[in-house]
Image (spheres, rainbow, N blue to C red):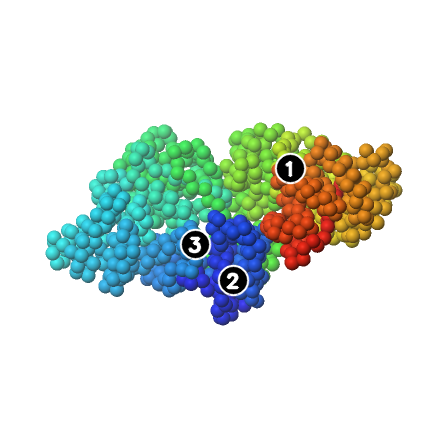
């Protein structure tokens, strides 16, 4: 079904050619989600986008109403509006959003301009401008100064400049003069369009008007900014003035494009005049007797993105050497990420700034053949620079000195491609003067301290698609969107991988996109498929790895060994401490190994203390790890699993207090510390995918008990994230392992935890089945200590299901196992009190809750809120208004103090019912709305349901509501 979104003018939505209205705030909501398209927006971001910094009290409930209206407007495409992790997004496919198409056309026009292909510039610029229907989103003034719309307006100006430049190059200056005049009025300080207007006027026989434009611009710049026009603008002025004085037949102004240091010219830089060269010396031709060299390889015609990086390099190359040192740029990144292509593109784009030539050499730091020495390359460069071969010195230092002398006064650009290390490069760097050097390497080359550094990362999704489409055609990709998505995911943003796949698709018309996508799905098929003639992703990675293996440095060789072992853990981020456990190395040495791998671009370090593989490098490392002995692999994974099990135990201890837990096995590696409950929860949330994987690995390894010992410490996280099912896979997998190993205690532990988890999601029947299974196993084992916890959980789940007598029977079964009521665990006592309340024993319930509360304040502060809520419900039922409200208000404060969102939402909902019970409908509504706001933000479905039911009942005062539903916190070994 064809969908089209429009933001370049009035907001529009078309589904199958039919325009669908999106009125009011729903339209504003769609606009916020489309800027930029596809990026998830949190609830807070959406509220800010719809109401600004002072949203109304009802903003969150209203937001959900507008989301519902937007789904209605989308009609059959309502599933485009997705929610994940509390954030919303609107799915936009390639070719569906006019702003994205506009940006693609702009990029094509810019690339064509860099290639001096002016007919293509004109075609793409006109196509881009045709998409522009007026000021973007005029109906939503609150968005007009947003970064996204400001960026769109700036891009519109860039497209216009490119079209004007193409028209001037084609001699069509008469067609654009009036439009340029209007734009200079709209943008009185924007120099590029003033330069274009001056050129168009002069070529149209109006030099006086052209000079008047310059004087008007200069006056405004001086008065408003205190600056003179840029050198490029002054050059146009001087050329118009000279031509005017020369009379008819005098020279016309050259291209209006200005050097990159000027204020934002969109077209490529023209050759600078004598007074504006990098060296600051006159002349724009090679030194006499030294013909210009042009050794730069052919540019990549389908070069994609890298706009910011290219701008950084270009600006640095065109910048005068103010510190006396020659310009040095280092481009680093993993193999296949496009370093050479970027360096070559920058060299072609700045060729006119280096009239004495461009030198190029592949240093062979990585790949086939031995690395080239500086001694060898200096000899070649000296001959290239005019030194007779017989006059080249024998000593390397002498060659370097002569090389620096030859370059001292020359404007030469040198590209040193594929460098191994700083030592290989250092003698090839000029000492000073106007020469410039670009070095590319898979290492960071920290030994070159004065360099401008550009670190390349793999492409993001839009640029991946653009490159693949440029290589094989958009039509093939749009015909098979799911297969295209699988291919893009498999290539993981690596330009080399995309080029291989794109070339295969382009030259195998009989093979479908689905066929290539299927190859990536076969075991080990991805890297095997990413090869084509001399292009080979595995070969590129192998060269980087072998550079460490064969290095004379001991640390490099240790890093190669570490890389192989880390391949056992290729898909998840990991900390230094986890790596230390896996590698069985001290923390300091592990940091050195990881930093060496990051320096070699074999590992990523996205945030401090966290490391990860690029997806394809992880697969390569996993292949190397498979070559380790089975014993070595198993021992490493046991060390890692043991570390995660112990770390999770620490995190769970910070989250929840429980009477007993199975101790995790000891580890020699350093474990993380958790300052509070929130820190423990954050760590578990972040590491849950890794923990899930480790449960599966443990089940297949020599220490299967690690599966249920790890999963058993998820209790605190499960109870804190009610309604989320991310716990299900690790718990079910751990139960399966315990069954396979016939470990009854492990089975009981997992049944108990699964019962608690399902209970937190209000799946009461499933919860009770698991809990009764745990009770039966513990009966057989005679483990009364654990059994009391399970019976308490049965009582809690039965109460939640409304089966109060059944729950009370479970509690009574457990009571003989305790030596007196004063020895009842807090959580058990709470469940007992809840069931007394539910079965009508209000006096007994109050007494038990109060005793439980006093003990909680001392030993279980995290349970205080839950006990207060239920005690407040009992007091409400007994008609003691003041005490009930006091109890529930304290529960709200306690929940806020420990930042427990569910407890706060639950306490507010109970407080609302209490207000309504005693006839205060206004305060009841206020509490329900505040509770609903929190519950909707975090997805607490039961609280949402109770709040909505309560709000619907406000026309009937004195209703009992649901009454005292807060259950006891679950427990378990």
Q: Nearer the viewer, residue 869 or 436?
A: 869
Number of the label disc, if any, that sits on residue 505: none
Viewer-side label of 3, 2: 3
Q: Which mark is residue 677?
A: 1
Identify the residue at image location x=50%, y=59%.
Answer: 25
- Which residue is found at the position 68% from the left and 42% from the top? 882
The label shown at residue 477 is 2
**What is the number of the mark on residue 142?**
3
User: In the image, 356: left or right of 724?
Assistant: left
Give the CA separation, mark 3 to mark 2: 37 Å
Residue 130 in which image quadrant: bottom left
Lower sequence index among marks 3 and 2: 3
Q: Secondary structure at mark 2?
A: helix
Which structural element holds mark 1?
helix
- Label 1: how many residues lie within 10 Å, few (<14), some (14-19) or many (20+)? some
Q: Quadrant of the N terminus?
A: bottom right
| Residue 545 pos. (x, y %) | 55, 40
């Amino acid at each position: 079904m064809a969908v089209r979104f429009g933001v370049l003018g009035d907001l529009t939505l078309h589904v199958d050619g039919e325009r669908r209205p999106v009125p009011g705030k729903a339209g504003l909501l769609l606009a916020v989600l489309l800027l930029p398209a596809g990026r998830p927006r949190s609830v807070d971001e959406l509220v800010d986008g719809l109401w600004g910094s002072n949203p109304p009290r009802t903003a969150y409930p209203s937001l959900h109403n507008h989301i519902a209206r937007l789904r209605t407007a989308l009609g059959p495409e309502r599933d485009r509006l997705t929610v994940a992790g509390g954030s919303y997004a609107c799915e936009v496919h390639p070719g569906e959003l006019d702003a994205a198409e506009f940006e693609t056309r702009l990029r094509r026009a810019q690339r064509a301009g860099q290639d001096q292909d002016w007919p293509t510039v004109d075609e793409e610029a006109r196509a881009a401008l045709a998409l522009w229907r007026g000021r973007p989103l005029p109906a939503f003034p609150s968005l007009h100064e947003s970064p996204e719309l400001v960026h769109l307006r700036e891009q519109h100006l860039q497209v216009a400049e490119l079209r004007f430049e193409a028209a001037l190059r084609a001699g069509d200056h008469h067609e654009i003069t009036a439009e340029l005049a209007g734009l200079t009025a709209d943008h009185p300080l924007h120099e590029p369009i003033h330069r274009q207007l001056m050129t168009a006027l002069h070529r149209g026989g109006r030099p006086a008007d052209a000079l008047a434009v310059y004087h008007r611009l200069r006056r405004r710049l001086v008065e408003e900014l205190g600056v003179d026009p840029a050198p490029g603008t002054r050059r146009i002025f001087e050329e118009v003035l000279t031509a005017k004085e020369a009379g008819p037949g005098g020279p016309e102004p050259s291209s209006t494009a200005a050097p990159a240091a000027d204020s934002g010219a969109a077209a490529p830089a023209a050759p600078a005049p004598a007074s504006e060269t990098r060296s600051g010396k006159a002349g724009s031709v090679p030194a006499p007797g030294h013909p210009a060299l042009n050794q730069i390889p052919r540019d990549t015609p389908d070069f994609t993105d890298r706009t910011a990086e290219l701008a950084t390099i270009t600006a640095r190359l065109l910048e005068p050497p103010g510190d006396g040192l020659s310009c040095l740029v280092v481009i680093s990144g993993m193999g296949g990420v496009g370093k050479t292509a970027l360096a070559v593109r920058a060299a072609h784009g700045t060729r006119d700034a280096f009239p004495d030539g461009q030198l190029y050499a592949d240093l062979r730091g990585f790949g086939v053949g031995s690395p080239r020495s500086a001694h060898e390359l200096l000899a070649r460069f000296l001959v290239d620079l005019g030194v007779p071969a017989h006059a080249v010195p024998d000593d390397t230092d002498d060659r370097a000195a002569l090389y620096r002398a030859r370059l001292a006064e020359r404007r030469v650009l040198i590209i040193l491609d594929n460098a191994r290390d700083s030592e290989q490069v250092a003698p090839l760097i000029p000492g000073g003067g106007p020469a410039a050097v670009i070095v590319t390497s898979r290492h960071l080359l920290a030994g070159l301290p004065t360099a401008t550094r550009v670190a390349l990362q793999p492409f993001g999704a839009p640029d991946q698609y653009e490159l693949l489409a440029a290589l094989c055609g958009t039509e093939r990709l749009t015909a098979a969107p799911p297969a295209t998505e699988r291919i893009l995911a498999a290539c993981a943003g690596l330009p080399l991988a995309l080029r291989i796949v794109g070339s295969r698709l382009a030259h195998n018309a009989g093979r479908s996109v689905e066929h290539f996508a299927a190859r990536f799905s076969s075991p080990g098929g991805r890297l095997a498929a990413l090869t084509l003639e001399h292009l080979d992703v595995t070969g590129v990675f192998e060269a980087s790895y072998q550079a460490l293996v064969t290095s004379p440095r001991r640390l490099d060789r240790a890093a190669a060994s570490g890389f192989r072992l880390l391949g056992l853990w290729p898909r998840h981020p990991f900390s230094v401490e986890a790596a230390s456990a896996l590698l069985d190395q001290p923390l300091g040495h592990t940091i050195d190994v990881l930093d060496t791998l990051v320096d070699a671009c074999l590992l990523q370090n996205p945030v401090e203390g966290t490391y990860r593989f690029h997806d394809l490098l992880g697969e390569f490392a996993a292949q190397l790890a498979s070559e380790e002995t089975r014993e070595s692999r198993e021992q490493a994974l046991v060390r890692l699993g043991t570390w995660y099990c112990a770390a999770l135990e620490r995190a769970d201890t910070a989250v929840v207090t429980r009477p007993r837990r199975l101790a995790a096995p000891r580890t020699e590696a350093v474990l993380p510390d958790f300052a509070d409950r929130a820190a423990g929860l954050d760590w578990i949330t972040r590491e849950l995918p890794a923990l899930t994987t480790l449960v599966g690995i443990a089940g297949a390894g020599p220490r299967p008990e690690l599966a249920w010992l790890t999963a058993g410490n998820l209790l605190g996280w499960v109870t804190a994230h009610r309604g989320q099912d991310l716990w299900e896979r690790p718990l079910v997998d751990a139960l399966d392992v315990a069954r396979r190993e016939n470990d009854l205690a492990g089975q009981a532990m997992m049944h108990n935890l699964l019962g608690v988890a399902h209970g937190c999601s209000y799946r009461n029947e499933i919860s009770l089945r698991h809990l009764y299974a745990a009770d039966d196993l513990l009966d057989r084992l005679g483990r009364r200590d654990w059994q009391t916890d399970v019976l308490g959980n049965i009582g809690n789940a039965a109460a939640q299901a409304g089966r109060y007598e059944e729950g009370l029977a479970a509690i009574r079964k457990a009571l003989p196992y305790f030596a007196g009521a004063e020895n009842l665990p807090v959580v058990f006592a709470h469940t007992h009190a809840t069931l007394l309340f539910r079965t009508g024993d209000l006096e007994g319930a109050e007494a038990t809750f109060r005793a439980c509360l006093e003990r909680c304040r001392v030993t279980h502060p995290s349970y205080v809120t839950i006990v207060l809520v239920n005690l407040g419900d009992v007091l409400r039922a007994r008609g003691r208004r003041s005490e009930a409200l006091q109890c529930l208000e304290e529960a709200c404060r306690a929940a806020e103090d420990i930042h427990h969102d569910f407890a706060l939402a639950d306490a507010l909902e109970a407080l609302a019912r209490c207000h309504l019970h005693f006839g205060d409908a206004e305060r009841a509504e206020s509490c329900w709305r505040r509770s609903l706001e929190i519950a909707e933000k975090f997805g607490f479905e039961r609280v949402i349901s109770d709040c909505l039911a309560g709000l619907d009942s406000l026309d009937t005062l004195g209703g009992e509501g649901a009454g005292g539903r807060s259950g006891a916190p679950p427990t378990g070994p």
